[in-house]
Image (tube, grey):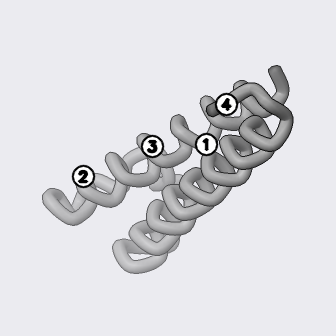
Amino acid sequence: MKFDVLQVVGMVLVAVGAQGAIRLLIDHGKLGLLGWLGAGFAGTLACYVVVAAIGVVLTGWAHDRAKAAGRRK
């Protein structure tokens, strides 16, 4: 069950990071969810990319662990 939850959290991070990065690339003025950082365009874009990358790694790791535990085929 723990790995299922971690997979969902990872997928949410991927979705939020990717959507934020794409939205920022389309409209440079709207910093979105991470606008409170005050890092400007480049810093905020980098943060969105890092969030998406963390989500991909977390989802892959949780999937592999669930597969090793016999919960995935």
Residue type for callout 4 = Arg
Residue at position x 71%, y 48% from top? 64
State how far apart marks 3 and 2 are (Cα).
10 Å
Left or right of 55 on screen, residue 1: right
Q: Quadrant of residue 10?
A: top right
Residue at position x 85%, y 35% from top? 69
The residue that label 3 is drawn on is 16
Judged by depth in the image, the label closer to the viewer, 2 or 1, is 1
Comes first in the chain, label 4 or label 2: 2
Label annotation for residue 72 = 4
Comes first in the chain, label 3 or label 2: 3
**Disc 3 on helix, strand or loop?**
helix
Left or right of 66 on screen, residue 17: left
**Disc 2 on helix, strand or loop?**
helix
State how far apart marks 2 and 1 are (Cα).
20 Å
* Image marks 4 and 1: residues in contact by CB distance under 8 Å: no
State how far apart marks 4 and 1 are (Cα).
17 Å
**Whether residue 8 is situated above or below residue 38 in the rendered picture:** above
Residue type for callout 1 = Gly
Q: Please state the horizontal and vertical placement of residue 61, each as a whole percent of the image.
A: 71, 52
The residue that label 2 is drawn on is 23
Label annotation for residue 10 = 1
Left or right of 62 on screen, residue 16: left
Q: Please state the horizontal and vertical placement of residue 20, each as a whole percent of the image.
A: 36, 51
Residue at position x 84%, y 27% from top? 2
Whether residue 68 is visible, yes or no, is yes
